[in-house]
Image (spheres, coloured by chain):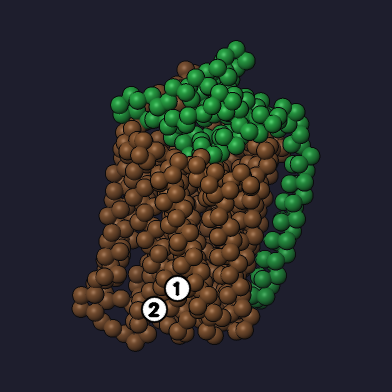
Chain colours: A brown, B green
Amino acid sequence: MQFQSQAVSRFYFTAAIGLFVAQILFGLVMGLQYVIGDFLFPAIPFNVARMVHTNALIVWLLMGFMGAAYYLVPEESETELYSPKLAIALFWIFLVAAALTVLGYLFVPYASLAEWTGNDLLATMGREFLEQPLPTKLGIVIVAIGFLFNITMTVLKGRKTAISTVLLLGLWGLAVFFLFSFYNPDNIARDKYYWWFVVHLWVEGVWELILAAILAFVLIKVTGVDREVIDKWLYVIITMALVSGIIGTGHHFYWIGSAEYWQWWGSVFSAMEPIPFFAMTVFAFNMVNRRRREHPNRAATLWALGTGVMAFLGAGVWGFLHTLAPVNYYTHGSQVTAAHGHMAFYGAYVMVVITMISYAMPLIRGRAANSSKAQVLEMWSFWLMTVAMVFITLFLTAAGILQVWLQRVSATPLPFMATQDQIGLFYWLREGAGVVFLVGLVIYIASFFYNGGEEKTAA
Amino acid sequence: MSRSFTPSMARNIFYGGTVFFALLFLALTYQNEQVLPTRDNRANLTEKVAAGKKIWETRNCIGCHTLLGEGAYFAPELGNVYKRRGGDAGGTEFIKSWIQAQPGGTPGRRQMPQFNLSEKELDEIAAFLKYVSEINTSNWPPNIEG
């Protein structure tokens, strides 16, 4: 660690991993409810578990991005963070807001939560992923503004690099597009259209800038490849991401009342969305093959390579699988969508945050890398979580194909619940893979506390 | 990548490409706003429907169901539930009595919570679901089962 203030990212990384655990536990609850329908009912109905599962994911990824920025920007800018105190204050605000929100989901009926938190003043709740009460949404905006101010001031007073510029663009875009969460017209067709300005333009737009910047930073550090080479790759990748991804938003507009021409625009452009992810994979392997140093942190290198591959598979391949309008006509809103969502989020965003944590945490703790035994544990967790996610995705894809066939293609279509009964086996298998994922996560956390035969290297 | 292709060229292509496609997206969005009135059933968007949408949101229905294919995949699609359950011949009554009868209570089966909606609120949520079922969705879902 070159600058003292980089240490603030430790708060963010720690909380991110804590929320990650909550996310997985609630995911397992939901997985069980898929096969034992009344499990924990009415204490934790499925919709409540799902809010915790998805909102915890979003918040911990945001925490991870912020932590990554607080670590990366001072080093890129070659200067201390503008205000470490602000970073720590915002951390606590964000954490308390997130905790209160989750407690609200769990212990207050959602309708009462809406009433108490001013949803009647400005109705924003009850839309997928944007379930947060108004004060939480406003809190996110305040935290984002303070965070962006802090990071931007740091960049402005120091060296400007391609990596920090791209990261800033991504983070500013993230904040700007979140503002669409406050727009909720009575017209559901229009509501759905602009809802995607948050959801799609985040995960298939500006988040890809953040992803590429973090990956480029870690690759420079672990491979020692020339910045000039990395910068070119970075710009080429994010160009392809936004050129395909912005109009690619159209693949969500096929069946929600919007214009029919989106079937063409959406299909053609989103068919190109795998290209930047493929380029990212080639980029990661290419840089590691051309490395000019043997960085002692092999675990971080593994996560970086894994991010490329899994983002390509999850976001690229599994996205392409159902993005063309004639295919999507049958798969829309089925378990195929769930399969894609799981591997895309894990492969792209979960893994890039863990890549950054894996690289930065040892340095924050005063060593270039963890002991080889701790790294072996971490690599075990990499393989367990990654392989488990591959199987979760495969089982959900199988469930989805069967669901589409039984419910939508067959000459004698079954009702929804009758179809669900037919595909229960795959839900059980998915739950099993989920348990393996949890084991991987526990091992991951254990790797932080394992320092048997620590070989300390000067940071 | 070749040496004649410099980082600043790559950067300029990025900014140029992004601005171009962002503007194209805005133009398409403008065009979409012109098309929406012919498809989104706004003539029937009454205050009752708007109130129904709010009930839909504040009971977090999307946390289990899909609506026009978006949402959670735990419970049936509701974009066409009005038509599936009888349409003008009984769709409203079915929706209201279904919501009132929850949870079903069959052991091991997925359960829907009881929301204790008033008669007025039941009418509103049913009106909302009727309204949604009449949006032009390019013939989605493929059949009545959703």
Q: Position of residue B123 (x, y in %)?
A: 59, 24
Q: Nearer the viewer, residue A339 or B45?
A: B45
Q: What residue is at 37 percent from the left and 85 percent from the top?
A: A459
Question: Do the numbered discs 2 and 1 sit on residues whose CB atoms are within 8 Å?
Answer: yes
- Residue A313: in sight, yes or no? no
Q: Secondary structure at mark 1?
A: helix
Location of residue A434 in the rendering, given as x and y in whole percent from the top left corner: 32, 47
Q: Residues within 10 Å of mark 2 (few under 14, many from 20)?
A: many
Along the polypeptide, which appears first: circle 2 or circle 1? 1
Residue depicted at 39% across the width and 57% down the height: A20
What amino acid is labelled 2 in the image?
A: Ile
Kindly identify which chain the residue marked by label 2 belongs to: A
Q: Is residue A291 left or right of residue A157?
A: left
Q: Nearer the viewer, residue A214 or A44?
A: A44
Q: Give the residue at mark 1.
A: A9
| Residue topped by disc 2 | A364
Which residue is located at x 51 percent, y 81 percent?
A: A75
Q: CA distance from mark 2 to mark 1?
A: 9 Å
Which labelled disc corresponds to residue A334?
none
